[in-house]
Amino acid sequence: MDIGIDKIGFYTPHIHVDMKKLAEARKIDPAKYTIGIGQDKMAIAPLTQDAVTMAANAALKILDEEDRNAVDMVLLGTESGVDHSKSGAVWVHHLTDIQSQARAFELKQACYGATAGIQMAMGHITMNPDRKVLVVGSDIAKYGLNTGGEPTQGAGAVALLISANPRILAIDPTSAMYTSDIMDFWRPLYSDKAKVDGKFSNQAYIEFFLRVWKDYQEKTNRSLDDFEALCFHLPYTKMGRKALGAVLESATAENKERLERHYEESIVYNRIVGNVYTGALYLNLLSLLEQGEELPAGSRIGLFSYGSGAVGEFFSGTLQPNYKKQLLTTEHGKMLNDRRELSIEEYEASFEDALPIDGSTRELDGQTDPGPVYLAGIADDIRQYMKK
Ligand code: CAA
């Protein structure tokens, strides 16, 4: 029985910053951001969007009545959780009207959370083939104004419906994983901004990728020849390019041409959204599927997931016939095109705006936010989620 991705929904907030203008404001050559880092635009989350609302907005794009009755597990991968106790998945379950005889919980391991959810979903569907699992990766990447990480911020969510007989990507059972306790990137409980050892994080990413890629090849006897395309966790698009380059050094000209061509197609969305942490790998996959040429059924795609701290995993899947029909290419394109550009002054002025943490009430204006689900404020330390 094939199990894998049956539907993919993507949500990113309605405002963004232009990277060239950010570079100019920081007195940096814009080519450093657009070529050196490889980013053109950076999504910004207004206060009315958090990990829960973005996850619900991504999931609402794909769920129909049949799905709502078949889903019995809701898994939210996030490192932007809104509560130390209650999982965001319970709110997502409620906001998307999924039937009640379900499990809902949150998974945390930096940007790896959604991959953990997919692997858990694979096991669940193996045992319960008539059920479906909703896995969402949803995050706000925030490093701070004038920091080295600033050009690698972003916000968004990718929702994946995992089922038997999937119509997009059947996931192969074999994968290769690697865990090692390192401090390349983390976020202490008292901080809303990530701490990072930037250069070390880049090195660790490549090291983990090469390890799991080697292990995967040994386990499966597959090589680059077996892959139509490789997808990567993308904190910024140059990072995946470096990882791809590391395996192309000894590749044939044919493999190099094919994999580099598909890499360009796979970064279209990431370039204009920025880092979405747990959803970044799946945004890379979505961009390949929606922005690339239609690939033959059975084409194998490799996926490298990396969550700082750190866990890496390489796994793969095969494309299903007519997968393009399952995609929301037009809707996603419209959402991205309809976004409003913030001036650098607007971005800076709102950067530190936050909900009160002293139990007081703050109401937010949801009318300025086109998202169907939004955060309407906080009262008595309880977040007020609303659906239009
Ligand atoms: N024109 C073209 N390119 C230029 C340029 C110019 N004028 N000026 C600089 N560059 C190039 C540099 O040569 C460099 O290229 P290479 O990496 O190929 O050498 C690139 O621009 C970046 O320059 P620096 O290394 O000098 O940039 P930096 O010191 O400001 O930091 C960064 C870059 C480390 C990515 C930083 O933005 C950062 O810390 N980001 C957050 C951490 C991160 O994303 N890490 C990724 C791995 S960890 C992970 O994946 C988990 C996660 O999601 C966070």
Image (tube, grey):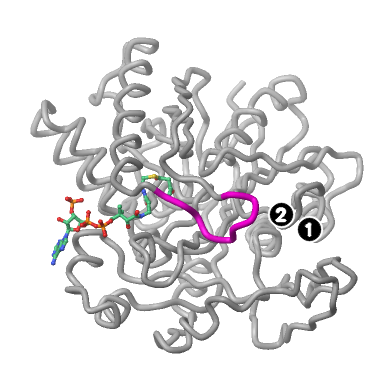
Q: Position of residue 286 (x, y in %)?
A: 45, 51
Using residue 329 as the reference point, say whether residue 28 is left or right of it: left
Residue occupying the point 56% across, 71% down: 45
Q: Residues within 10 Å of mark 1 (few under 14, many from 20)?
A: many
Q: Residues within 10 Å of mark 2 (few under 14, many from 20)?
A: many
Q: Secondary structure at mark 1?
A: loop
Q: Position of residue 279 (x, y in %)?
A: 52, 50
Using residue 64 as the reference point, say whether residue 51 is left or right of it: left
Q: Please state, as top left, top right, bottom left or bottom right, where the C terminus lies in the image.
A: bottom right
Q: Which residues are magenta?
A: 188-196
Q: Secondary structure at mark 2?
A: loop
Residues 312 and 144: in front is 144
The residue tagged 2 is 63
Query: In the rendering, which numbered label is found on residue 96?
Result: 1
Residue occupying the point 24% across, 26% down: 224
Closest to the camera, between mark 1 and mark 2, is 1
Answer above or below: position of 218 versus 238. above
Q: Position of residue 211 (x, y in %)?
A: 33, 22
Q: Amino acid at mark 1?
A: Thr
Answer above or below: position of 306 versus 373. above
Q: Amino acid at mark 2?
A: Leu
User: Which mark is first along the chain, 2 or 1?
Assistant: 2
Quadrant where ligand 1 appears: bottom left
Using residue 360 as the reference point, say whether residue 364 is left or right of it: left
Q: Please state, as top left, top right, bottom left or bottom right, where the N terminus lies in the image.
A: top right
Residue occupying the point 51% across, 52% down: 325
